[in-house]
Image (spheres, helix red, strand yellow):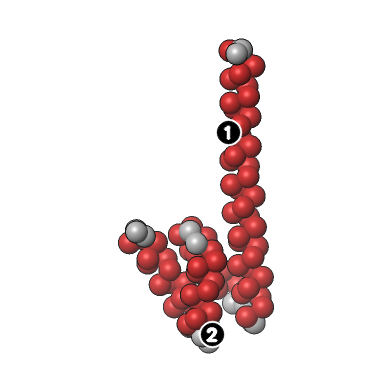
């Protein structure tokens, strides 16, 4: 079950999309694609600060945020496995 802060981020993103004149369903789709509270809050900030002029600009930013998140996850995974490998080298089998 989603936390209250996640639900709040979800609602705020949808409200921001609607405030820009786009359908509520568009906001829901963006929120579902982003998934995490942090990415939804980042998108909401973008909507208020950058003032995108089209749905395409909003979708492009959503994809960029999703790409950043994926790179971050890959970086953390690589750091974890690098740490495990270093432990193996230091301690041996």
Query: What residue did someone put label 1 on?
Result: 80
The structure residue drawn at horizontal position 64% and vertical position 16%, both measured from the top left corner, is: 89
The first of marks 2 and 1 along the sequence is 2
Quarter of the figure with the C terminus: top right
Horizontal and vertical percent position of residue 55:
62, 80
Between 93 and 63, the residue placed more toward the observer is: 93
Residue displayed at 40% across by 72% down: 11
Q: Position of residue 72 (x, y in %)?
A: 60, 48
- Residue 41 numbered mark, or none: none
- Mark yes or no: residue 45 visible: no
User: Rounded to the nearest whole Å, what is the CA distance between mark 2 and mark 1?
Assistant: 41 Å
58 is higher (above) or lower (below) than 89: below
Q: Nearer the viewer, residue 33 or 48?
A: 33
The residue tagged 2 is 22
Task: Judge from the rendering whether residue 37 lies leftward or rightward of residue 70; answer left or right.
Answer: left
Q: Percent x, y for residue 33?
A: 55, 66
Question: Which residue appears at 59% of the width and 54% of the height?
Answer: 69
Q: Secondary structure at mark 2?
A: loop
């Amino acid at each position: 079950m989603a936390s209250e802060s996640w639900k709040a981020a979800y609602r705020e993103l949808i409200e921001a999309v609607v405030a820009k004149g786009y359908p509520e369903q568009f906001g829901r789709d963006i929120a579902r694609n982003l998934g995490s509270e942090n990415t939804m809050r980042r998108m909401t900030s973008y909507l208020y600060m950058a003032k995108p002029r089209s749905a395409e600009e909003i979708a492009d930013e959503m994809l960029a945020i999703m790409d950043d998140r994926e790179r971050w996850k890959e970086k953390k995974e690589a750091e974890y496995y690098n740490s495990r490998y270093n432990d193996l080298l230091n301690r041996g089998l």
